[in-house]
Image: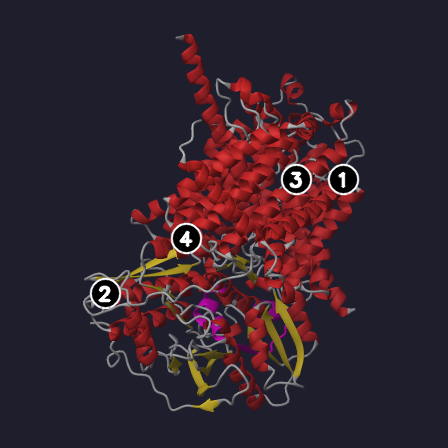
Amino acid sequence: MRMRRGTPVAAAALALALMATACQGAGEVTEGEDADLAVATGVTEDTITVGTHQPLTGVAASGYSPISRGAQAVFDYVNEQGGVNGRQIDYVVKDDAYDPAQTVDVTRELVDEEIFAMFGGLGTPTHSGVLDYLNEEGIPDVFPASGALVWNSPEEYPLTYGWQTDYTKEAKVQGQYIAENFPGQNVGFFYQNDDVGTDSQAGLDQYLTDEVVAREHYESSVTDISAQIAALQAAEAEVVVCSCIPAFMANAMLTASAMEYSPQWVVSSIGGDTRTLQGMLAAFSDGAVEGEAADAFLDGLVITSYMPRIEDPEDEWAQLFIEVWEDYREDDSEVLTNTHVFGMTQAVMFSQALLEAGEDLDRQALIDTLHSIEWQGPSPVPFTSSEDDRGGHQGVYVVQYQAGGDIELIQDTRVTDNAGGPIEETDFTQLSPSELAFHD
Amino acid sequence: MEKFLDLTYNGLSSGAVYAALALSLVIIFQATRLVNFAQPAFALVSAYTAFAVIQATDSYWLGFGAALVVGALAGALVERVVIRPIASKSELNAIIVTLGLLLVVQGVIGMVWGSREHGLRYAFDYKGDFSPADVFAVASIAVVAVLVFVLYRFSPLGLRMRAAAFRPEAARLSGVKVGLMLTAGWAIASTIGALAGMLAGPPFLSPHSFDLVFVFAITAAVIGGLDSPFGAILGGLLMGLAMSYVSGYVGPEVATLAALVVVVLVLSLRPDGILSRPKARKV
Amino acid sequence: MSSPTRERAEGATAPTSQGSPPASPKAGFWKRIPSPVRNLLLAALALTAISGLMLFSSDLSSLRYAAVGYTLLAIAGLQLLVGGSGQVSLGHGAFMMIGAYSMALLVLHLPMLPLAANLLIVVVVSAVAGLLVGAATARLHGPYLAGATLILAVGLPGLAHRYHDVLGGSNGLRIRVAGAPPGLENLVSDEQWTSIVVWTVVLLALAVLATVSGGRLGRRMRSVRDDETAAAMAGVPVGSTKVAAFVIASTAGGLAGALQIYVLGTATPSIFTLALSLTLLAVLVLGGVGSMWGALWAALAVVYLELWVSDLAGLLEMNSNVENNLPLVFFGIVLILVLRFWPLGIQGIFQRLAARRRLSETSR
């Protein structure tokens, strides 16, 4: 093969550069310049393209795939009303199967397809893998769907805005609630063996000390949890805090009932979706208790919550979500759950931010809006997305499930931080759907 | 002590499930010399069938029956249509094809029923230490084991099936319909797979419900000896107990590591499984 | 127990010596070069071509090429184990995990250490892992080995959960690595550069694999694959040959894992799943056992098949349950059909086409 004269030179240069990389400290990262935010990538005259990565297949799909379907329904609704500032929202959902390797790929693909922003990227292990990338590329990373503390790191990740009440804040309120309402009772913890568990215990331990008689964890790949539930029973835990996803809340209730063990369950928002729990547990109730399916298990369940809840017939947001779901769901047999509401609430707030960012939309405008916006719903919990606090929802309220399908509000919203700060009541009230502008 | 007993009960009832799946693997291995990765697919199809029938009729036993029938049909069909053309060519290819089949079935089930979890009832009351449901699991495996033993040792059908598997040419010459015997072997195995699905399915069924169960079943079959139905059952119970103890005394995250340790220990002592025949047949 | 791959042995390896492209007419001179040098030259040539291609590719494409690269390396290692020595491993993902986590720990705790040193350490670590696994499983054959390696792939991630202080639990470890070297920033993007680095390592490693496979060890492995007893009688040390194959495969797998985290920046237990290990073996058979080209088709299938199908599915207006599961079903059907009609996989199809063309040329 004959080479042109330039080729050896180029090859030598390449070899030299490769040598340089081989010898350079692999972990020595040089900081790049800040990305330019005065761009309107993904925004046209009449559309805004936003992207997200979600587990639509694989083992995590069962728990999380309703979220993006809920969000889609709201965006369809918003678009039907005329969109935001005359633009239709194009919501692009890519399946990452909860595999961080795929998250990296689909996120790059989304950016390649010119999304305006990343919206609601789901999962801690998955989204963590693209945090650096999104922030370096100057892609607004709005409302990742998980309660990890890392989303609230404005210094390190200036374009990332948390959404969910983080696990520690939520657990602090749970701990205080238990200390106040079940004084002197034995408390057991049952938690997922990852940051959900660690961060939750960091909160619970601030209010519960001597009462804690057992700490058991589960691994999401191992569905047999009899040993752990038996240990909670053996330790005579009267109140069990479940920092777990619905599949394991249901599993824990069923396993406990098999052991004829019935503690007072207190569950975090991530596992407190009673509709999902009903769907899973309905087959096991044998009609022992009159009323809704699975009441035998769920009656008296204490749930911390920050979004509107569909069990609440009074709540106007819940009503809107039910209507929107009826009108825009793809599959008529799919029952609306609070997991859908997660995506729906996120979608409303994101639409509101886009609307408020105005007609001359660029990334900087969205960021400025997020910093300045005064959030007033749909959640009955104050929300922050300011320059230096991206903690999202700041607290939780507490409800209790009643046989028959209703929920009762047993403690109004309280807010706190994720460190050692106090828990405070708040006089925050959200606007109703008709008062809150989130579409044209 | 009470904890130990609890863990033992628990290990036995999950071990029974591994044993059932392992047994179905062994039967297919005996018939076709193939580790059937589509086994969880049969269990899935059957369990979802049962779920649909139970929902429609509100009768558990109708669903149970439907599951077994569908399992048997699926096994026979797969052997005829998918496996037979390739099984004689290459074992590795056959394994990969069964894997492909598993992917297809998981995908189709996801298409039809979605990815969310569905509650699937137990056969009997699941409450209490060693509940009726647990007893049913262990007892049904025992019954199946005896049936399989009787079938293979004493019934003419079983003898023909063994002959068809081990000496196909000789069997053919003596008038055995070798093809039919292979299909029968698959049908029997997938019926047992369906039973395993009905035992492992509850409480919650999703397209990936049986992934790990199946891994443990393969390990059970391997440590028991792939040529030995009783080895499969022994292996299943051993895996169930080992993982239950480790899970309870050390932590659930190391249960799978414990399974690895068991496999390494057993196979380093007996490379062909616990109940393998002393002289390994060379094919 | 017969070797699972014996049947295909002649057909697949005969036309090309492993790893090198079909010999050109001027093979005389080429053949006289010692095989390590020849393989290195080929690697250099391929690297030049790929780097050239990279410079005209988008960042996303570059990263996908990098993914093809490290997947190719992992599969090529598995190829040597399965196609070369006849040992079927269902746990190759475990070695990738070992490599990825080793790399992550090195970068996190010793950021000053050069990339080359990191990769060398990864090679040593994964070789040791392969030695352990190979020694523990050398007496196992066929499905027993498959079962043992399967549980290895499922069990190993348990370590990450057990020692989550060091290994990060289910959120795993995240690293950031240096991008394009100073002076080249304006010429190549970080992604393009990363991909070139990956391919450099991959091609070097492939050259080594091809050399090994073409040498004495390769011949020994194939004789063990074809008939252990005969090999033993011919004086081949069966046990150590099998272990050697495992060590080579695990090293390739570990190196591939290290390159993967070098590209992705994140290693979690949920990356190194059962599905990954099974996929690696499945695509290897799909691509064609017994030739390095088969590993390339396999790697391309891993990276692009699902992408294309999900893009296609996105275009058709379908129920979302159907759309989401279509790539899975499609992949399953491809496996079944290809192996049903072309037992030698994609490489088998190409070979058959080439043979047919040669036949028609000679008959003319």
Residue drawn at x 62%, y 28% is: C214
- Name the residue tied to disc 4: C189
Amino acid residing under circle 3: Ile
Q: Is residue A429 left or right of residue A266?
A: left
Q: Quadrant of the N terminus of chain B?
A: bottom right
Q: CA distance from mark 3 to mark 4?
A: 33 Å
Residue drawn at x 52%, y 51% is: B47
SS for callout 4: loop
Q: CA distance from mark 2 to mark 4?
A: 38 Å
Question: B196 or A227: which is nearer to us?
Answer: A227
Count neighbours of disc 3 (C-alpha within 10 A) and say few if under 14, some if 14 to 19, many if 20 or more.
Answer: many
- Name the residue tied to disc 3: C248
Q: Quadrant of the C terminus of chain B?
A: top right
Q: Quadrant of residue A178?
A: bottom right
Q: CA distance from mark 1 to mark 3?
A: 23 Å
Amino acid residing under circle 4: Ser
SS for callout 3: helix
Question: Label 2: chain?
Answer: A
Residue drawn at x 33%, y 73% is: A367
Q: CA distance from mark 4 to mark 1?
A: 52 Å
Provide the residue span drawn in magenta.
A253-280
- Name the residue tied to disc 1: B271
State yes or no: discs 1 and 3 in contact (Cβ < 8 Å): no
- Name the residue tied to disc 2: A79
Count neighbours of disc 2 (C-alpha within 10 A) and say few if under 14, some if 14 to 19, many if 20 or more.
Answer: some
Residue A135: image location, x then y, percent: 41, 65
